[in-house]
Image: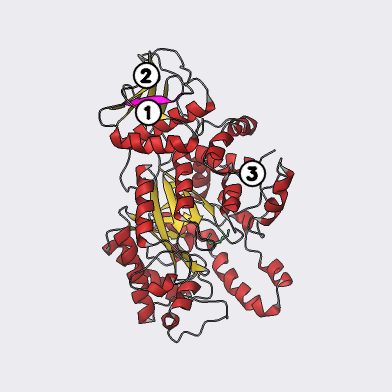
Amino acid sequence: MIPLPRALPASQNCECPRLARQPSPAGVYLEGRNAKATYSVARALGDRIGVALHPAPGGGTDRVLLERAELPEPTGLPQAVGVHPSGEPTDESYAICPTPDGWRIQASTEAGMFHGLVTVLQHQVLARPLGHLLDAPGVAWRGLSLDIARNFRSPGEIETIIDLLALYKMSVLHLHLSDNQGWRLESRAYPNLTSGDAHLTRAEYRHLVQYAAERHVTIVPEIDMPGHTAAALRAYPDLAGDIQFPHPLIRYLSPRVPSAMAFARTVLTELADLTPTPFLHVGGDEAFGMPAQIFAEFFANVIPHVHALGKRAVAWQEVTRTGALSSRDLVQLWISDKDAFDAATLRATTPAEHHHLIDLAEETFLQAPGDARRAAQQGAAVILSPSSPLYFDRRHAHPSARSDQEERRERVGFPAYEPEPLSAIHDFDPFSHSRDQGVVLAGVEAALWAETITSFEDVSFLLLPRLPIAAERMWSAPAIPYAALADRLRGHEAMWTTMGITEYFQHP
Ligand code: TNX
């Protein structure tokens, strides 16, 4: 099972029988007085991975009894570290106890009951005996950031990704909704943003928020500003005012252009109206060529606006340089030493007309080493997304076991990143990483950027089997040798295939 439960063996005073029951191929029967909502969602997830979940009363065996109750004994596991995306501390723990005719799942919250059911569903596919266990996550914010701006993903494809997140007990889908290449969420006030381009309608976005919430996944939407906004400036050229940008490839929203500021505030207001949960991601990365003072003015306006909407901001690490964030907000750290911006090499390999652009980019990257310290000083907890090893838009280092995947392996992944093996993700430890950085941990997010992606198959090839490996580290499951994990991953391929995912990296 992935993630591996954190406290497996029954404790001494547990009344659970010391047996481990074999899952039945015919599926399981769900009972529980208030389990109706959980039942329909879990059945839908079961259907996706090929497990039949029947309503009670059913057969005499293979009954799963869902019980909302305080756990019968302390799990011995500390409360998850970090910030839950609901904004409230949330108990996600559950216990499973084998009974004469099946299993009993106990949890004090819907989220815990759902995780328990997912555990049972996975066991049905893996056909391994399931005994007594206690389980709870080690980190509250367990996320995947998905770039649907560079290459759009349909609602159905996003649902599949949400199902994968639910299957691996992750809690956040961060949707990168806008960038230079496209704006992917319908706006009422600014309809030209999406005209002619593939995008989510407001109704589709609302549906996805609901679909995710039912699976205990929170969508954290991102409108990336003030850089990465060329798509908005193409749709509404007036937003540029009379700003003289320092390079033809540089565009940003300036707080000194009134229409640009009205735009930023309005699209965030619309986003807040569509999003019932507390966090809105406001971007803030790579605003190349934007004078520091003007960048700071932008966020001095935008962050209080987010707060006035009743929301909390998440921002890329560059925003720590503005002083606009408060302790309610979260900072996402992404720049790894390993992928340091190498201005010298870039200058040597790019035409001279772009050298000024490289200088401007270098200016923002040179400040990166101070961002974590600034986040800590501002009392903002951080989401760890170090590009190494958590950016999944990185080529796989090892050849695929299937030679017909080699073309894809060479093509997909950001070319500037050195390819990495799957074991690099398995070696990532959020707790030691946050200690090294001297920050307060909010959570962990992997990220899949889409510059090199042209299809859902490209997505699944970069995502699997990396996602379950990362999920296991986010859950803080006991670390086992990588070889054993690689073995366990094999058993999951059947679930992905049943879900209709045909292209996952066939790790050697
Ligand atoms: C950096 S991560 C970016 C993205 C790119 C990504 C490629 C971040 C905040 N900005 O715009 O897509 O690198 O991996």
Location of residue 188 (image quadrant)? bottom left
Can residue 65 be seen at all in this image of the molecule? yes
Residue 59: mark: 2
- Residue 455 coordinates in the image, percent (x, y): 58, 56
Residue 3 in magenta stretch: no
Name the amino acid type tagged 2. Answer: Gly
Q: What element carries label 1?
A: strand
Up-down: is 378 above or below 33?
below
Residue under the point 39% across and 81% down:
257
Residue receiving disc 1:
54
Which label lies toward us, 3 or 1? Answer: 1
2 or 1: tag closer to the N-terminus: 1
**Applied colour scheme:** secondary structure
Residue under the point 62% across and 34% down:
486
**Is ligand 1 less than 8 Å from the beta carbon at label 2?**
no
The part of the chain drawn in magenta is 26-31
Name the amino acid type tagged 1. Answer: His
Can residue 297 be seen at all in this image of the molecule? no
Q: Do tag 2 and tag 1 residues touch (Cβ < 8 Å)?
A: yes
Disc 3 versus disc 1: distance between alpha carbons? 33 Å
Disc 2 versus disc 1: distance between alpha carbons? 9 Å
Residue receiving disc 3:
505
Name the amino acid type tagged 3. Answer: Phe
- Residue 189 coordinates in the image, percent (x, y): 33, 73
Q: In which quarter of the image is ligand 1?
A: bottom right
